[in-house]
């Protein structure tokens, strides 16, 4: 029993059936008392009318008429339950069959002791007649008591069956709830040891449990994705940090092995310092990506005028691009605003501008464009360089993605991955297309009304 | 100049103390948050270097309590956390500058110098003058020896920064933060390309270059050209 009571499902079901049974009990009591009072009131009215009839007889013919009327009524209608008694001033019963002594005036319940039928309750109205005489009209309470008993037993039966039905219903409902919940907890139990592939079965009914299951499954999908991401990062880091760390180590080792004079050690130390900086930059990039992917930055989001930002960037990059013997043009639709982080969007655009210079030959024409595509703002950086083969385009946004073609250029293959993460954090996407010739990378961000 | 370094890593603190000592500064050290809190209020410093993660009392908490107690000394917050949210929290707690570990000493020194000797020029100043160069902030006008020089907005901003910190080093990242609002390092050296344009416009027809380049550190405006 304690095990069942420990179950919320059973507890709720039992509580409900107990409340229902209590309601039936209260209803039964109310009906019982109302019906009882009503019947007793009717009896009082009946004996009052009988008395009034007999008073009329008395008024017409005095005591003789009354006694004969009483005798007549008792013999004519023995089954209607009325009994009478007429007493003279001395207390002697002069008519009627009620076996009682002379009572006082008023309405009262009288207990009769009948040798044959045992004690019997009657309702009586005692009226005063002239010269100290008394008229008593009574009616059996037996009928009322029978009705009372019937009502009580009916409701008693209803109460018992409600309790019985309630227990059965509670057991069934509780069992059903437990079974539905057991599927959810079963899945959770299966996941805890580490197998994230399990999902809660969803039925076609679409009820609350299914909605809960759908929400939990979505949560599991997200967790699995985050874990996968984490696993990917750790293995990438382990793999991609080894190479530069090994290079750094070799550098230091060869400096130590070489001649001990400062002249020959300085270049090696300088290279080692540069490699440390490179490693630190790699770390910052990885941390920045995971910060963006965690979604924690959304709290700092504000309105960002992408048009203004892109214009600023174009102005800032123009001299450096020209110094690198490439050209930069800007074509920007004014007043386009998104909800986001200005610095992150700037960093995304900057990564695209940096890429457009690093992976293209001199003479390349680079352009930055801001327009709208449907409900999105499109910030595109295009170049007329060698482009990326269609098959490789989905690969280049991956973490540590380095195409064979770019093995020789410096970089960690994190730039576009960060841009994709920034796009996703703003509810947008990154599109990589052919620029005929060259590459067109477009950052699509949901537009805010200006 | 008196500098307080609140840093629990003895190696970092020692490195900074030694290097600042070489530059002629008096350095005090605190290795935990309680000492830092106490020293910062008990002694008077020109600038404070505060590590964000300190034992006993967290660096941010120390900073908040200093500011609550009315301590106005410039504070440079040092941190291993380079996230955007961390930087915002640091500046909200009352830091004047923010430097992510690991850092080049030259960067720290340049930032501390900028913090220590707050330029006598207040923000209401509308005119800066260094040697024969004058810069009018209202008219956005630059003159050298009376001759007007036409600058792009970013070149103007670079020159303004240099003139406000005349005689002191301004690093690449300081420029990126103050002019572009970037707290990251773009691959493309946009500071260098703007600065070389500023330089050629400023020096056209003159023999001397008022802007010094300190390789790997930054730029400095000479007090007299």
Image (tube, coloured by chain):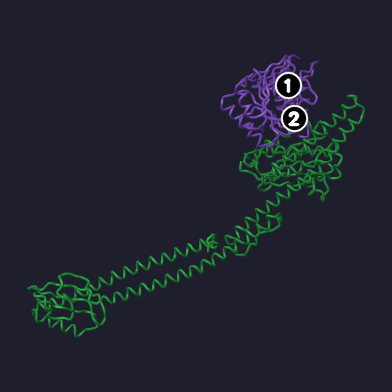
Chain colours: A green, B purple
Which residue sits at x=72%, y=38%?
A347
On what subunit does the disc labeled 1 rest? B
Task: Decide if residue A289 is on the left or right side of residue A7.
Answer: right
Report whether residue A338 is seen. Answer: no
Residue found at the far left of this picture: A131
Question: Residue A441 sits in which quadrant?
Answer: top right
- The x and y percentages for residue B178 are 69, 28
- The x and y percentages for residue A114 are 23, 80
Question: Which residue carries the number 2 mark?
Answer: B103
Q: CA distance from mark 2 to mark 1?
A: 14 Å
Report whether residue B46 is seen. Answer: yes
Are both tags, 2 and 1, on one chain? yes
**Residue nearer the viewer, B221 or A190:** A190
Q: From the viewer's perspective, is residue A273 above or below residue A43? A: above
**Residue nearer the viewer, A201 or A125:** A125
Q: Are marks 2 and 1 in contact (CB under 8 Å)?
A: no
**Residue nearer the viewer, B218 or B193:** B218
Question: Which residue carries the number 1 mark?
Answer: B20
Task: Decide if residue A403 is on the left or right side of residue B139.
Answer: right
Q: From the viewer's perspective, is residue A278 above or below residue A106? A: above
Residue found at the far front of this picture: A115
Tell me the element at label 2. loop
Quadrant in which the C terminus of chain A appears? top right
Tell me the element at label 1. helix
Crowdedness of circle 1 by 10 Å Cα count: few (<14), some, many (20+)? Answer: many
Crowdedness of circle 2 by 10 Å Cα count: few (<14), some, many (20+)? Answer: few
Task: Decide if residue A13 is on the left or right side of residue A339.
Answer: left
- The x and y percentages for residue B43 are 62, 20
Q: Tag 1 or tag 2, which sits nearer the N-term?
A: 1
- The x and y percentages for residue A119 are 25, 77
């Amino acid at each position: 029993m304690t095990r069942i009571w420990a179950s919320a499902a059973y507890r709720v079901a039992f509580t409900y059936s107990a409340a229902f049974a209590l309601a039936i009990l209260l209803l039964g009591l109310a009906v019982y008392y109302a019906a009882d009072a009503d019947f007793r009131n009717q009896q009082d009215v009946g004996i009052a009318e009988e008395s009034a009839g007999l008073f009329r007889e008395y008024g017409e013919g005095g005591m003789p008429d009354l006694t004969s009327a009483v005798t007549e009524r008792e013999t004519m209608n023995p089954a209607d339950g009325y009994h009478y008694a007429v007493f003279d001033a001395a207390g002697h019963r002069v008519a009627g069959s009620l076996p009682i002594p002379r009572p006082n005036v008023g309405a009262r319940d009288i207990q009769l002791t009948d040798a044959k039928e045992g004690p019997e309750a009657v309702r009586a109205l005692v009226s005063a007649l002239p010269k100290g005489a008394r008229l008593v009209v009574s009616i059996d309470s037996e009928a009322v008591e029978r009705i009372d008993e019937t009502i009580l037993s009916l409701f008693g039966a209803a109460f018992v069956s409600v309790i019985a039905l309630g227990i059965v219903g509670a057991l069934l409902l509780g069992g059903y709830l437990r079974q539905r919940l057991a599927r959810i907890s079963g899945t959770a139990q299966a996941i805890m040891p580490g197998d994230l592939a399990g999902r809660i079965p969803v039925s076609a009914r679409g009820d609350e449990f299914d909605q809960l299951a759908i929400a939990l499954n979505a949560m599991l999908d997200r967790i699995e994705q985050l874990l996968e991401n984490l696993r990917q990062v750790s293995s990438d880091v382990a793999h991609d940090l080894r190479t530069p760390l090994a290079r750094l180590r070799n550098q230091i080792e060869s400096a130590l092995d070489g001649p001990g004079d400062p002249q020959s050690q300085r270049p090696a130390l300088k290279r080692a310092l540069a490699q440390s900086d490179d490693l630190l930059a790699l770390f910052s990039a990885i941390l920045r990506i995971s910060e963006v992917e965690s979604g924690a930055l959304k709290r700092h989001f504000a309105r960002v005028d992408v048009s203004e930002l892109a214009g600023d960037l174009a102005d800032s990059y123009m001299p450096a691009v020209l110094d690198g013997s490439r050209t930069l043009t800007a074509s920007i639709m004014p007043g386009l605003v998104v909800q986001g982080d200005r610095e992150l969007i700037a960093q995304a655009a900057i990564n695209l501008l940096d890429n457009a210079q690093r992976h293209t030959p001199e003479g390349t024409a680079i352009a930055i464009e801001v327009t709208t595509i449907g409900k999105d703002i499109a910030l595109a950086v295009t170049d007329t360089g060698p482009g990326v083969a269609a098959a490789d385009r989905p690969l280049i946004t991956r973490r540590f993605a380095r195409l064979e073609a770019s093995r020789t250029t410096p970089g960690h293959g994190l730039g576009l991955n960060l841009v994709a993460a920034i796009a996703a954090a703003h509810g947008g996407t990154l599109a990589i297309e052919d620029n005929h010739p060259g590459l067109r990378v477009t950052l699509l961000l949901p537009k805010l009304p200006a | 100049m008196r500098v307080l370094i609140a840093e629990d890593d003895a190696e970092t603190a020692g490195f900074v103390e030694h290097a600042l000592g070489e530059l002629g500064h008096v350095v005090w050290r605190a290795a935990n948050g309680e000492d830092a809190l106490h020293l910062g209020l008990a002694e008077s410093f020109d600038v404070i270097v505060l590590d964000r993660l300190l034992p006993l009392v967290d660096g941010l908490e120390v900073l908040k309590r200093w500011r609550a107690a009315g301590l106005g000394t410039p504070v440079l917050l040092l941190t291993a956390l380079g996230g955007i949210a961390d930087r915002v929290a640091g500046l909200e707690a009352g830091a004047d500058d923010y430097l992510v570990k690991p850092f080049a000493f030259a960067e720290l020194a340049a930032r501390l110098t900028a913090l220590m000797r707050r330029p006598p020029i207040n923000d209401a100043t509308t005119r800066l003058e260094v040697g024969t160069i004058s810069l009018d902030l209202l008219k956005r006008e630059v003159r050298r020896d009376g001759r007007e020089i036409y600058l792009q907005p970013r070149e103007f901003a670079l020159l303004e920064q240099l003139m406000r910190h005349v005689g002191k080093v301004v690093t690449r990242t300081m420029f990126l933060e103050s002019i572009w609002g970037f707290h990251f390092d773009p691959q493309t050296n946009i500071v260098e390309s703007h600065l070389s344009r500023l330089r050629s416009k400023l020096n056209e027809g003159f023999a001397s270059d008022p802007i010094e380049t300190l390789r790997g550190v930054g730029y400095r405006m000479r007090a007299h050209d």
